[in-house]
Image: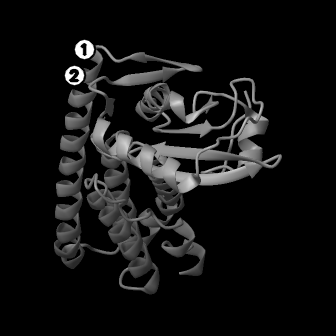
Amino acid sequence: MATVDIWPPSIDEILMVGETQTIEFKSSLSLMREAFEQLCGMVNADTAKGIVVFGVAPDGAVIGITDRFDAAQQKLSANARDLFVPRIGLEMIPAERDGKQVLIVCGKRAAGVPYHEYRGRAYIREGASSRQLSASEKQARLVRLEVGRTARLSAARMAALDRYLIEAWERRSMRNPEMAKSGLLTLDSWATSLEKQFAEATDEDKPTFAPALREVYWLLIEHAREYYASGSGYFATKDRVIRGLTAIEASASIDSPGATLLDSGDGTSNPEEK
């Protein structure tokens, strides 16, 4: 199945792909209710986003809309504002194809929202159609959200404690370079892999990687201390670990994106360049 990689995509890209799990065509604004039911299903699916294009038939033929763009946008915005719970963020993009006007409506589910309801019903998109979420499915989403929030907060508290413990630990650590050197590169590779998985994970999955990443960070900074002592290589490693722990701590916030784990090349020196 073809997909679109840029969001929001252009009308040409949308028409080339056709209707999918994240794209729905509606020939007229009179089908607004059905369109928003489908959009509700799309944003409640795993992709958490969807597009409805008004002025295009289900087979992809461009029909166009007769309403003025500003009037159409006001009508759609008012309907979405009054009937989506929680409110959904919409982006409306006027476009033209073959001399005919179409309106692209893009929606996304915000982080921390288990599901949206439209007219009191929650839908989920499966393939090119939508169905209502059952009561048990809605409850499971609420539970999963709360479990994820609790796990993120726990990981954040541990990471915050770690940042303070590092200062106490480094004051009493002793240098043992021969033992540290052999494991430093291996730990650096492990940390890089976990950082990448953590950065690319969804908010729900980040707590899965946080404990392992914390453990590797501690081993990495311990080996760096033993090998570099108070040299620049140790402080580069320490900066990397602090940034990583800060990112874990920040990931507990579901209202704003957390810190970004930086590439390991910026943080850990090569033991051969001691």
Label 2 to label 1, Cα distance in Å?
A: 5 Å
Residue at point 21%, 28% (across, down) = 143
Whether residue 193 is visible to the viewer of this picture, yes or no, is no
Q: Are marks 2 and 1 in contact (CB under 8 Å)?
A: yes
Quarter in which the N terminus is drawn: top right
Whether residue 32 is visible to the viewer of this picture, yes or no, is yes
Query: In which quadrant of the rendered view does residue 247 lie?
Result: bottom left
Compared to residue 45, the image places residue 222 above or below, namely below
Compared to residue 199, the image places residue 19 above or below, namely above
The circle drawn on residue 136 is: 1
Counting from the top left corner in percent of width and height, residue 264 is at 52, 66
Is 137 positioned to the left or the right of 131 in the image? left
Q: Look at the numbered disc 1 and give the secondary structure of its residue.
A: helix
Q: Of 178 and 146, which appears nearest the observer?
A: 146
- Residue position marked by numbered label 2 in the rendering: 139
Q: Of 135 and 187, which appears nearest the observer?
A: 135
Compared to residue 153, the image places residue 231 above or below, namely below
Is 70 positioned to the left or the right of 2 in the image? left
Query: In which quadrant of the rendered view does residue 21 lie?
Result: top right
- Please state which amino acid type lies under the numbered disc 1: Ser
Counting from the top left corner in percent of width and height, residue 204 is at 34, 39
Q: Look at the numbered disc 2 and give the secondary structure of its residue.
A: helix
- Please state which amino acid type lies under the numbered disc 2: Gln
Is 166 positioned to the left or the right of 188 in the image? left
Q: Residue furthest bottom?
A: 231
Counting from the top left corner in percent of width and height, residue 154 is at 18, 48
Q: Residue furthest right?
A: 98
Q: Of 41 and 202, which appears nearest the observer?
A: 41
